[in-house]
Amino acid sequence: MAVKIIAFVLMLSIVIPFGVYFLGKKTKKRGSTALVTNITAFFATLAVSTVIMFSNAFAAPAEEAAGAGLATGLGFLAAALVTGLSTIGAGIAVAASASTALGAISEDPKLMGKSLIFVALAEGIALYGLLVSFSILARI
């Protein structure tokens, strides 16, 4: 039942901004009105989903709740931290290496192969973090 409510609210948050855009007055502010409606509908969907998820609508049976302990919660936290921090690190590394690579390629096009290797190595950091988080989630 709760999933149907969330799906209905999500569909409304998609349909209402389109209705505001296509059925509204044909003015220059039509796009900004649709954008404000879309943002409002998104946060309304987020609020409704949060209320439903934190209510007792999805209460687990007593046997399953007894098995979920501190270790499971810390495992999820570790997986989230690994993914988030590795992605931030990869973003910083790609920002530095890609701008340098573009500068080097603009001066000498023969350096493209070498510079792409450094950019790919920087992006590999995010993939390694994702693999580690999958291995953590597999143990939970």
Image (spheres, rainbow, N blue to C red):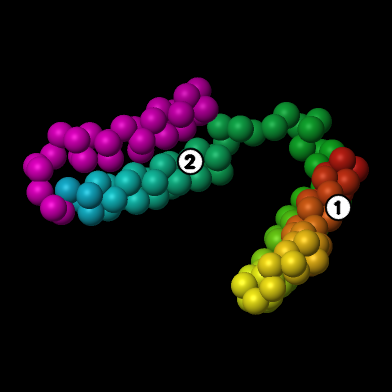
Kind of element beneath mark 2:
helix
Relative to residue 15, is residue 81 depicted above or below? below
Place of residue 115 in the rendered image (x, y in percent of width and height, measured from the top left): 75, 67
Residue 1: percent from the left, percent from the top? 50, 23
Q: Residue at x 47, y 24 (%)?
A: 4
The residue identified by callout 1 is 132
Three-letter code, disc 1: Val
From the viewer's side, name the closer residue of 81 and 71.
81
Say which of 27 and 42 sits in front. Answer: 27
Mark 1 and mark 2 in contact? Answer it, CB < 8 Å: no
Query: From the viewer's perspective, is 120 left or right of 52?
Result: right
> Which of the 4 image quadrants contains residue 19?
top left
- On the image, numbered disc 2 is attached to which residue? 49
Q: Nearer the viewer, residue 100 or 18?
A: 100
**Residue 10 included in the magenta stretch of the image:** yes
Q: Which residues are magenta?
A: 1-29
Identity of the amino acid at label 2? Answer: Ser
Q: Residue 28: x, y in percent?
A: 13, 53
Residue 108: name its quadrant. bottom right
Q: Distance from label 1 to label 2 (Cα)? A: 30 Å
Residue 100 is covered by the magenta coloring: no
**Residue 91's x, y, as percent?**
67, 66
Name the front one of labels 1 and 2.
1
Residue at 88% of width from left, 46% of height from top? 135
Which residue is depicted at the point 56% across and 43% down? 54
